[in-house]
Image (cartoon, rainbow, N blue to C red):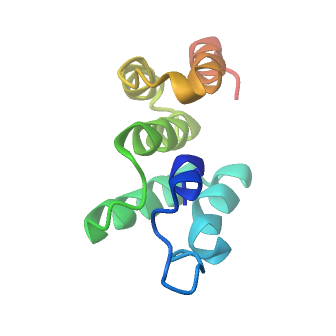
Amino acid sequence: MSFLNKIKGWGQKENGASEHDAADEAPFADAYKAGRGLEAVRFLDSLENKGDGWLLPPEARFDRALGLAAIGQREAARKLLLRIGDSRFQDAVDRALERVGSHNR
């Protein structure tokens, strides 16, 4: 669950428990950190196909860009990062753009 949604309380069940637990968030991060970019992108595709709004569009673009960069699709990743336009995590976007442009992960 995104940080913003946690603050606003969205995605909470009546008892205050999160609708999505840590296990829901782990597949992308685990795959990305292990260098399995294609698996990370496929996980994001499965989230998108659910259509439950788990990730806000800027967050989804950021995560997808990281996955695309990990599988060598740097130009596609760069284009996604440039379209984010969300100041809540602009520093992270800028760092990702630097990595994507430098050919180093």
Q: Residue at x 56, y 87 (%)?
A: 15
Q: Is residue 8 above or below residue 49?
A: above
Q: Quadrant of residue 101?
A: top right
For this rendering, which residue is in front, 1 or 44?
1
Q: Is residue 67 above or below residue 91?
A: below
Task: Tell me where residue 65 appears, x and y as whole percent.
Answer: 47, 35
Q: In the picture, which quadrant includes the N terminus?
A: bottom right
Task: Tell me where residue 69 appears, x and y as whole percent.
Answer: 53, 33
Q: Residue at x 58, y 57 (%)?
A: 6
Q: In the picture, which quadrant includes the C terminus?
A: top right
Q: Residue at x 49, y 84 (%)?
A: 14
Q: Residue at x 64, y 76 (%)?
A: 23
- Answer with left or right where residue 6 lies relative to residue 55: right
- Answer with left or right where residue 21 lies relative to residue 71: right
Task: Tell me where residue 80 appears, x and y as whole percent.
Answer: 38, 27
Q: Is residue 12 above or below residue 60?
A: below
Task: Tell me where residue 74 appears, x and y as whole percent.
Answer: 48, 25
